[in-house]
Amino acid sequence: MSDIDAIPEFKTKSGDGQDVGITNLSAFASGPGIKSMAEVLAIILVAVVIIGGTEILLNVFAVPQYVLPKPSQIGLALISDFHLILPHLGYTLVELLSGFAIGAVVGLVMAAVITQFPFVEKVVTPYILLLVTTPMLALVPLLILRFGFGYTPRIIAVALAAGPMVMINAATGFRRVDPGKIALARSYGASTIQIFWKIRAPMALPMILVGLMIGSIFGLLTAVGAEMVGGGFGLGNRLTSYSSMIQMPQFFAVVLILSILGILIYVLFFLIGKKWASWEA
Amino acid sequence: MNAQSSVQPKLRVRGATKVYSTGSGDLLAIDRCSLDVAPGEIVSIVGPSGCGKTTLLWSMSGLHGLTAGEVLLDGKPVKGPNPEISMVFQEANLLPWRNLDANINFPFEIKGTKPDRVWIDELLQMVGLEGFGARFPRELSGGMRQRAALVRALSFKPSVLLMDEPFGALDSFTREEMNRLVEQIWLDRPTTIVLITHSIEEAIFMSDRVVVMSARPGRVANIYPVPFPRPRSLDIMATKEVFDLTNAIKREIVGDQKSRFSTPSAPVFQAAK
Ligand SMILES: Nc1ncnc2c1ncn2[C@@H]1O[C@H](COP(=O)(O)OP(=O)(O)O)[C@@H](O)[C@H]1O
Ligand SMILES: [Mg+2]
């Protein structure tokens, strides 16, 4: 155990473990940083201009609906066909949530364990990087061949896409050991388990949240992509189906739902980060 | 208290020797250090940087073991972290994700004991931090953080307080304020204190005895008594006794480093016996 003999220097603020994660937290936790009512109004104004402007331009140039539907048509389709789209939103969410849960749990546990063994970590890291950089969508046709057109191949793909993202960021977090804080806990007689839960885990939390956010966004992409490859349900399937039937307003309504889903995920983790990881920003 | 227990030192270091194994061989950090600290005594340790002060203090706290020698607390060997001993680290070492209250509560969470609210409130009041419980470390000044660390260290009423350059990062005014605060707390509840510092003035103002360590491998080179009654006023720092003492200690440390550089044969790395 090298920890036991290490005398901390306390020269750097939070240990010198450099963050080499996919994104850095300060950008994430500080977020868009909306401060005043004026900024909110400005953002709404821009939306109104863009949507209204598109509506007018499409009208003026009489662009046919199958090329680009007018915002108003998309809105109407969203309302009139929402009951048809809703079940598919449910299917996609089931895939996303279960695949993400599996991937996140496995990724977190692996990050926590592997960072305790520097040698194992060195050996495993290139393979995790390989998993991070390989688009898991590429495996979907194979998974479908093996598991059929149900939920299974999609959930596996989502887990494979999210897990390594969670793991690589969480590992960055767990690697940031501050010997001084561990010495502090040990001076009160802390056990290894207590040190993990009271020092290592909270120190890793900001990076874990980054991993969970990126992992869930990747999970959403992979779920929709997998649905486009095969199987008769899910928002991705709606996209292929509406576009093949040239139902462009419905097609864009689904795209709109997907954007809102992505934004909700971001906002969720932004709020969690603000609540639990703002000490680092 | 009978005659014998008042003679027994609170903390006794005997022949403390510590060898670190490093990539480039063994490194003898401290060599046969011996020191007795009486109950309620304040002892400072000064010495050139890297001479093994922290190594010695960590051995006293039980945070790491010795290669040879032993540390005794009330006559019993210290083999690991001990509930009677509390550490104050360089820079406050507060947990940034916890507010002040939660930071002070941290030792009790680890120990699984109940905090003595009355005592903690008294401490907070003494250091002027009452009402700051909801603040996070980043919202406190350096001095406030170190005061919070002091409260945390004393919260569970240790009988020995080990401090490793606790005020080194503070400006000199804040540092003097902290020194007086420690003395005030000590007067309120006498604790045995070992203080590492790189400020000879701080060492003299604070302690009953100043231990000077030699350059690596660290040995106890000399021990200077500082016979001023408490509470001390900053005025003692202007006396001739303190002036002479400061110079003697300074000469000892500087001279030690000079001799180290003038004798190239002096072993910097030395194998364990
Ligand atoms: N964990 C360690 N492994 C190897 N060498 C160490 C370790 N900790 C301290 N040292 C070395 O031991 C010597 C004494 O260190 P330290 O006790 O921190 O000195 P000081 O506190 O007096 O500055 C230094 O040369 C330092 O580099
Ligand atoms: Mg030191």
Image (cartoon, rainbow, N blue to C red):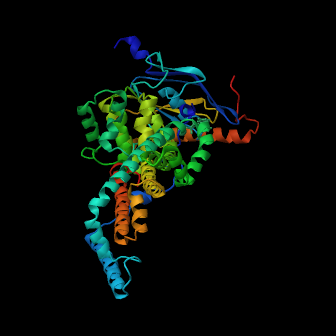
Residue B268 horizontal/vertical position (percent): 70, 36
Residue A209 horizontal/vertical position (percent): 41, 49
Q: Is residue B266 above or below residue B40?
A: below
- The answer to whether residue A273 is seen in the rendering is no
Q: Is residue A11 above or below residue B35?
A: below
Residue drawn at x 49%, y 21% is B79
Query: Does residue B19 appear to the left or right of A78 in the view shown?
Result: right
Q: Is residue A240 above or below residue A277?
A: below
Residue drawn at x 25%, y 70% is A37
Q: How many marks?
A: 0
User: In which quarter of the view is residue A98 placed?
Assistant: top left
Q: Quadrant of the C terminus of chain B?
A: top right
User: In which quarter of the view is residue A68 placed?
Assistant: bottom left
Q: B142 and B200: which one is in front?
A: B142
Residue B50 horizontal/vertical position (percent): 60, 39
- The answer to whether residue A54 is seen in the rendering is yes
Q: Quadrant of the N terminus of chain B?
A: top left
Residue A85 horizontal/vertical position (percent): 32, 60
Q: Residue furthest bottom?
A: A60
Residue drawn at x 60%, y 45% is A127
Q: A196 and A140: which one is in front?
A: A140
Residue drawn at x 32%, y 75% is A71
Question: Where ligand 2 lies, by quadrant?
Answer: top right
User: In which quarter of the view is residue B94 placed?
Assistant: top left
Q: A170 and B33: which one is in front?
A: A170
Q: Residue furthest right?
A: B265
Q: A266 and B192: which one is in front?
A: A266
